[in-house]
Image (cartoon, helix red, strand yellow):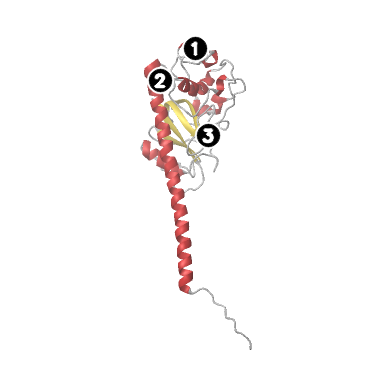
């Protein structure tokens, strides 16, 4: 006698249950990713505010700007002559970190190469000493005294602090001129600045996908610290003009629908 085998498929109800579970899992993953990104934004805002507080404390204690302070051998513990910014007119003690043409010249002109333990030979090396002076004053963490050591390299988490959202921070001085990749319809930042950039050895970029932030994340950070506009206030954007911020309006907005990393940010930390 032949046995009859029947095959049973999923019922519509069972398929609906499976699809619902898959949807919930995907939704949970996406929500988790969003929560992680929001946490990185919060952490980056706290990071910037900590640098601003560190610089204020440094100025109150030493009446000088970090990176630009002379006589560090006698003023900061653990400092050798490699801590000393270049002396002379327009150099140490003028209240400017590096060269005042930071915006138009591009920040890599300030960094050029690792100091590597040598005594500074150019005013631009103040931008490396900026982090060293804050470290030696015990005001920041997340960097080492790499510029003071032979063989020291330019690297995030070593000579410069890594950004908690990606990339890292460089320091300098804005003279109000519009920087490379910055919005061309509004003035640049004036005063001591730190900038969130993707690479230490590559200038602020106006190439799509080669910056540390999407416009939406840049806008989030800007709104938490400043006015939420890319071309005004003491937080300003740079990047791809067509997709980070609008090029024509008097007060352009972040183009938050852009999904690629087309934005970076400049923060004025002392006016």
Q: Residues within 10 Å of mark 3 (few under 14, many from 20)?
A: many
The residue closer to the viewer here, 3 or 158, is 3
Instruction: Mark 3 vs mark 1: give the one in front.
Output: 1
Q: Image quadrant for the N terminus?
A: bottom right
Task: Residue 222 in the image: state x and y as whole percent.
Answer: 40, 38
| C-alpha distance separating marks 3 and 1 | 33 Å
Instruction: List x then y, in percent, for residue 210.
Output: 55, 40
Which residue does the image show at 61% across and 20% down from the upper left?
150
Q: Position of residue 220 (x, y in %)?
A: 40, 42
* 178 up-or-down from 254: above or below: above
Quadrant into which the C terminus falls:
top left
Secondary element at tag 2: helix
Residue holding disc 3? 204
Q: Residue furthest bottom?
A: 1
Q: Is residue 71 above or below residue 227?
A: above
Residue located beneath label 1 in the image:
73
Around disc 2, counting alpha carbons within 10 Å, would you say few (fewer than 14), some (14 to 19), or many (20 or more)? some
Which residue is identified by label 2? 58
- Horizontal side of 154 relative to 187 (left or right) equals right
Q: Earlier in the sequence, mark 3 or mark 1?
A: 1
Q: Secondary structure at mark 1?
A: helix
- Badge 3 marks a residue whose secondary structure is loop
- Picture quarter containing residue 2? bottom right
């Amino acid at each position: 006698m032949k046995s009859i085998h029947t095959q049973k498929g999923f019922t519509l109800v069972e398929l609906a249950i499976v699809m619902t579970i898959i949807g919930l899992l995907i939704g949970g993953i996406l929500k988790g990713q969003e929560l992680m990104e929001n946490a990185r934004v919060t952490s980056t805002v706290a990071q910037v505010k900590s640098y601003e507080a560190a610089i204020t404390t440094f100025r109150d204690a030493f009446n000088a700007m970090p990176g630009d302070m002379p006589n560090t051998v006698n003023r900061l513990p653990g400092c050798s002559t490699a801590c000393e910014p270049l002396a002379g007119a327009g150099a140490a003690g003028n209240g400017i970190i590096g060269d005042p043409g930071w915006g138009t010249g591009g920040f890599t002109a300030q960094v050029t190469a690792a100091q590597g333990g040598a005594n500074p030979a150019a005013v631009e090396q103040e931008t490396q000493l900026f982090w060293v002076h804050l470290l030696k004053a015990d005001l920041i963490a997340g960097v080492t005294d790499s510029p003071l050591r032979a063989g020291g390299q330019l690297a995030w988490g070593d000579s410069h602090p890594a950004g908690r959202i990606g990339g890292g921070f460089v320091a300098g001085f804005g003279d109000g001129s519009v920087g490379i990749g910055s919005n061309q319809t509004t003035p640049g930042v004036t005063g001591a600045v730190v900038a969130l950039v993707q690479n230490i050895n590559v200038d602020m970029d106006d190439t799509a996908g080669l910056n540390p932030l999407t416009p939406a994340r840049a806008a989030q950070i800007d709104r938490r610290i400043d006015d939420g506009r890319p071309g005004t206030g003491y937080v300003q954007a740079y990047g791809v003009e067509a997709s980070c911020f609008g090029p024509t309006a008097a007060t352009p907005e972040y183009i938050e629908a852009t999904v690629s990393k087309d934005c970076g940010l400049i923060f004025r930390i002392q006016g």
